[in-house]
Amino acid sequence: MVVSGHTPQQMQAAAESAALAPPPPAERPRPQKPRSRMMRQYDLVERVRSYNPDTNEDLLNRAYVYAMKAHGSQTRASGDPYFTHPLEVAAILTDLKLDDATIVAALLHDTIEDTEATRAEIDRFFGPEIGALVEGLTKLKRLELVSREAKQAENLRKLLLAIADDVRVLLVKLADRLHNMRTLEFVPEASRRRIAEETLDIYAPLAGRMGMQEMREELEDLSFRTLDPQAYSVVMQRLDALADRNRNLIGEIESQLARKFRDHGLTARVFGRRKRPFSIWTKMERKSIGFEQLSDIFGFRVIMPDLESCYRALGIVHTTWPVVPGRFKDYISTPKQNDYRSIHTTVIGPGKQRVELQIRTEEMDQIAELGIAAHAFYKDDIGSPTELLKRESNAFAWLRHTIGILSESANPEEFLEHTKLELFHDQVFCFTPKGKLIALPRHANVIDFAYAVHTDVGNSAVGCKINGKFAALSSELQNGDEVEVLTSDAQSAPPSAWETLAITGKARAAIRRATRTAVRDQYAGLGRRIVERLFERTKLEYADDKLKGALPRLARASIEDVMAAVGRGEIKASDVARAMYPDYKEERVVRYGAKKTAAPATATKAAAPSAEPPRGPFAIPISGLNSGLPVKFAPNGGAVPGDRIVGIVTPGEGITIYPIQSPALKDFEDEPERWLDVRWDVDETSPQRFPARIRVENVNEPGSLAQVATVIAEHDGNIDNISMSRRSPDFTELTIDLEVYDLKHLSAIINQLRAKTIVARVDRVNG
């Protein structure tokens, strides 16, 4: 076996020679990240020796030389020597104060995959423990965790199996991913997004589940910057501006808190800390609020010398400043599953500012930041770091429990269900009836679920079942829910009110887009009917191809744009005819013996409330509010089937349907171009209600209103609104907005009301 042109014997001799080199001066400063040069052997040894005086320097030196020669002239996408990557991974792990074997595994983690090195050679040079770590990391490198459910489930299974025997494999893998994310800008754009999604979906939550909060936050922010650079930039600008404005305030709060503790005989380390961009962005998305509405961007950490001091500090804070209700949590008495321990509270502190506090000991702070890695500290020589990891970490206990599920899972998807329900604290995982996994933010509802499945499913959703039971579409989902979305082809667009109910940005954007499209389609449908009826009546030939050639003359980009403009009242149908047939002349008529008013052939005009417009085959059919046209009914009276009706086009609002006897039509006498010939086209097999208004003058006595309402209810009328006014001491006038099926239904209700002795008069109102 030859590695980069050197035999194993030559490699070993070189490593041993390097190990015999004189140690660097003791005063040599440790390099700080970020480094401008590649870390040297003595730099690495010094970093490890700073927390482990008994480190095996020979082992570290041999691993350094072996990895450097194995990777040889290989380079990264950035152009740097490839060896800089495993070296940086090792440096990250020295910050976590991990043992020698883990550091060596980090140096060697790419050798089997990317060089001619073998597992047998690693075992021979560095021992089977390190060989097993490197082999486990080699297997993980071949996994692609961004994939469809079944493949993702199987790969996640392999990931956890690889770290089951030795959690240090996971720690090296997380450090490997962190350095790759730090240098992601050198990766081709197509791969950058996949890697960032994989990091955000798998590695960042896994780091959090292991209690490694600092690493989780950096992985999230790096992914966020790649996946949504514009949002990341906006949040960072706002944070920087806020930090500049509040710099003195933060220092003042720190000093006041420290002084208050000193006054009570406590020594505390207090420092302010702002939340990370990704955390802020997700909170804004989850709560649908702006940056200015966030009240907890800055938090303050209070580090106390011992456990008792933490609770004394809490008492001082709560007796000095008002507590914000519902913002107190004691994770010391009840730690989180990942070993996190701290007291959380929020008070209205100095300067009437809302101050979020985390009170903990130094050891708790280390565990909060480093998580499972914090247990690898050497503690009185009791056991190896690996044994400490296994014995003292609840997070590792969770990992062992999760691995145990592998033997009980019938298939990869079932394993994925068990794992992700516990792994992702900030998400809810639900399932389709076919077992597809859908990840949503906390507090998401069925509407969000439907759009996560597919936009078409969301747009056509009309109901749902949660775990087999019917539920409202606004129902909040819980981990493990099985959700069946009920759809209807009759609903092509969602109600616009759903936008306020949806939690996810994807759902809200889809609802807005569908609503806009539906409105535009309605106007385009109306415009097409208007245009086609004009052409039919004037015996002109209409064809889309012919209109396409006339688009420049109408200053519109497409046929649909033209039709929507006609429907909105921005273009007249006669303008379309003239664009297609330049010789077309608009027909002028005089109607109903009124004053001579030029009116287009499409217009139908009433000179008086009693006038009746002509009806012909070209009238636009009106079937109700759900007809696919932008239709509404006359205010202050409405219209019902059986009424003779006309349509008035209002630009940007569609058609308003008036009964021909409505006095409001007088307001449109001088605008004949807005009048449309319309007719009822109601499906009697699917009855629907229409608006009408009546005025009832009844005797002012107890129970009279109830009698009126009873008559309406008994005759299947629906009351939308009632207003009352006292006309005299003996009589009250009721104005009632009803919903009825047609004119016959309305007449029956009016006749029954007139038969009541308490009713003096009933009239229909036409606004």
Image (cartoon, grey):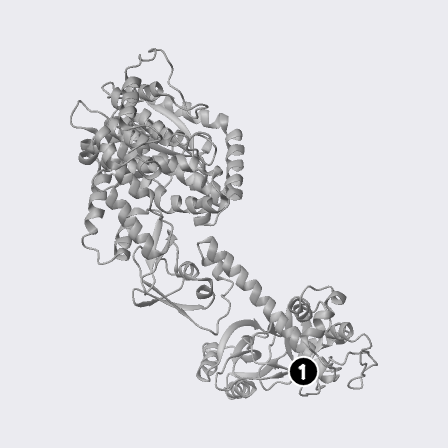
Toward which corner of the image does residue 219 lie, by quadrant? top left
Q: Nearer the viewer, residue 406 or 58?
A: 58
Q: Position of residue 419 (x, y in %)?
A: 27, 50
Q: Is residue 662 left or right of residue 393?
A: right
Q: Is residue 63 visible?
A: yes
| Number of numbered discs overlaid on the protein picture | 1
User: Can you say whether 660 is above or below 344 in the image?
Assistant: below
Q: Is residue 305 visible?
A: no
Q: Position of residue 271 (x, y in %)?
A: 39, 26
Q: Nearer the viewer, residue 557 or 678?
A: 557
User: Can you say whether 101 is above or below 510 in the image?
Assistant: above
Residue type at numbered disc 1: Ile
Q: Is residue 281 left or right of residue 399?
A: right
> Where the N terminus falls, by quadrant?
top left
Q: Position of residue 229 (x, y in %)?
A: 51, 42
Q: Secondary structure at mark 1?
A: loop
Toward which corner of the image does residue 326 lie, by quadrant? top left
The residue under label 1 is 660
Q: Position of residue 403 (x, y in %)?
A: 21, 47
Which residue corresponds to the image point at 44% horizontal and 42% vertical from the top-left? 223
Q: Nearer the viewer, residue 203 or 506?
A: 203
Which residue corresponds to the image point at 55% horizontal and 87% vertical from the top-left? 747
Q: Nearer the viewer, residue 16 or 767?
A: 16
Residue projecting furthest to the left: 382
> Where the C terminus falls, by quadrant?
bottom right
Q: How packed is label 1: few (under 14 Cα within 10 Å), some, or many (20 or more)?
A: many
Q: Is residue 463 left or right of residue 686?
A: left
